[in-house]
Amino acid sequence: MDETEAAPANEAAPANEAAPANETAPSPADGTDPPHRTPRGAAPKQDRSRATRQRLLTAAVDCLAEYGWSGSTVTVVAERAGVTRGAAQHHFPTREDLFTAAVEHVAIERRTALRGVVGGSTVHEAVGEIVDLFTGPLFRAALQLWVAAAHEDQLRPRVTALEARVGRESHRMAVRLLGADESVPGVRETVQGFLDMARGMGLATLLSDDTARRRRVVEQWARLLTDALARTTR
């Protein structure tokens, strides 16, 4: 009888009773616990950090295009991005760090824009699309970076190298859109002359809105390129 009476004591052993507690309070080592505590829709900290960095770079480019180098301070960029100056300096400790990163950001955005140009069915449409790229806000920001790089030793090598890459890609894009055959003597120089003209028009937009004049110039260049490229196929 003593053995049978001892059985209830074994049933009350705490090892089995503790199981429900483990279901509601996993140990810190349990990898399933943190996801249950994350509010639905809350962005991970790393994603928020990347988003803040992206906003700062976009704001830096916008400020350069709008205020120029001298007016684009870290405080102005932070306000444009909707973050505190401290948050901006967390990502970019110095102004040079911020705008060096902005150089690369502008180059990436410009290369993306170049690759996104589909082109029309005529030389005139292709010329218009290319000129639009060189007179838009990304190009204006790039111009401000060129001016800054002329006086800032830290920016100059980055701007020079990245602009060379953008220039090569611009040329390839123009050749593709215009259907030009660069194996024909003079065609490469003709395309490059057109791109130089487009850059010049981008410079002109810094001072005034010359939309009407630009339209006439685009029409004339479209005629010149149509004639020049037609002669190379004869």
Image (cartoon, helix red, strand yellow):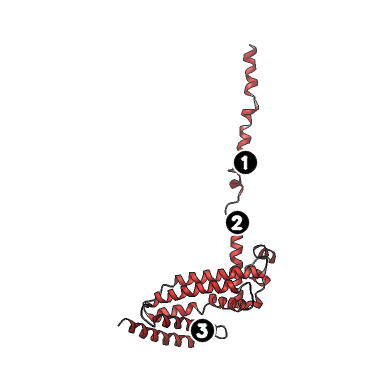
The residue positioned farthest toward the right in the image shown: 86
Q: Earlier in the sequence, mark 1 or mark 3?
A: 1
Give me the C-alpha separation between circle 1 and circle 3: 63 Å
Of 140 and 48, the residue lying toward us: 140
Q: Give the labeled residue for mark 1.
A: 29
Q: Position of residue 118 (x, y in %)?
A: 41, 72
Report the amino acid beneath label 3: Gly
Give me the C-alpha separation between circle 1 and circle 2: 22 Å
Q: Position of residue 25 (x, y in %)?
A: 64, 39
The N terminus: image quadrant = top right
Q: Earlier in the sequence, mark 1 or mark 2?
A: 1
Instruction: Locate residue 81 relative to residue 230 in the image: left or right.
Output: right
Secondary structure at numbered mark 3: helix
- Residue visible at 33% across and 82% down? 232
Secondary structure at numbered mark 1: loop
Q: Position of residue 174 (x, y in %)?
A: 43, 76
- Residue visible at 45% across and 70% down? 115
When asked about the image quadrant of residue 181, the answer is bottom left
Report the amino acid beneath label 2: Gln
Q: Of circles 1 and 3, which is in front? A: 3
Query: Dot 2: within a 10 Å radius of its alpha carbon, few (fewer than 14), some, or many (20 or more) residues?
Result: few
Q: Give the labeled residue for mark 2.
A: 46
Residue 200 numbered tag? 3
Above or below residue 111? Residue 40 is above
Report the amino acid beneath label 1: Ala
